[in-house]
Amino acid sequence: MSVRLLFRCQFCDAQPDPLTQINLEKSVPELMWGAYEDAMPEKWLIWHGRGLYGPPRYACREHRGDLVAFLREHYGTIGWHPWKRPPYPTSLRNPDKERAIAVGGRSAMPKWGYGPQVK
C-alpha cells in the first residue's frame, strides 16, 4: 500500500512545493530530537521535537519566526535546544544513524547485530 505524507505549515496551512516536499519526507525517519532543520528550496523550518519537546512541527518561509517563538515560549525552560540560533543545517543525516536505522534503531524491539549488515 502506498502512502503519501502531507505537510502543512503549522500557522497558515500552506503546502510545500514538490522539491521541498521531498526534503520534508526525507526528514521523517530521523532519530533526532530537539533540533531545527531547513528544508530547501522553499526554506521551510522543521522542528524535530519528540519526547519532552512535543511533536515534530513544520513552518513555511513566512512563519519560521513564529515557529521559533512558539517553541521558545513553550519549551524554552526545558532545555537549550529551542534556543539554538540560525543558520540551521539542511540535513541531519549521518552514517551512524543510517546504520542504526538499518539494524532496527526505530523498532520497539531493536535487532542490533541481527539485522542487515550495513558497511
Image (tube, helix red, strand yellow):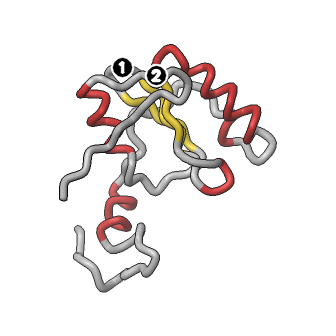
Residue at the spot 51% in from the left edge and 21% down from the top edge: 12
Residue at the spot 46% in from the left edge and 22% down from the top edge: 60
Give the position of the N terminus as an image quadrant: bottom left
Q: Which mark is residue 42?
A: 1
Q: Nearer the viewer, residue 31 or 96?
A: 31
Q: Earlier in the sequence, mark 2 or mark 1?
A: 1
Q: What kind of residue is marked 2?
A: Cys
Label 2, label 1: how many angstroms apart (C-alpha)? 8 Å
Q: Nearer the viewer, residue 112 or 60?
A: 60
Q: Which mark is residue 2?
A: none
Q: What kind of residue is marked 1?
A: Glu
In the image, is residue 51 above or below residue 90?
Answer: below
In the image, is residue 52 above or below residue 46?
Answer: below
Q: Nearer the viewer, mark 2 or mark 1?
A: 2
| Residue sticking out furthest to the bottom | 114
Residue at the spot 64% in from the left edge and 33% down from the top edge: 84
Disc 2, SS: loop
Give the position of the C terminus as an image quadrant: bottom left
User: Is 21 situated left or right of 28 in this image?
Assistant: left
Place of residue 7 in the rendered image (x, y in percent of width and height, measured from the top left) = 39, 35
Disc 1, SS: loop
Place of residue 10 in the rendered image (x, y in percent of width and height, measured from the top left) = 53, 30
Q: Which mark is residue 60?
A: 2
Q: Are marks 2 and 1 in contact (CB under 8 Å)?
A: yes
Binning the other alpha carbons within 10 Å of mark 2 as few (below 14), some (14 to 19) or many (20 upward) gives: many
Place of residue 37 in the rendered image (x, y in percent of width and height, measured from the top left) = 47, 35
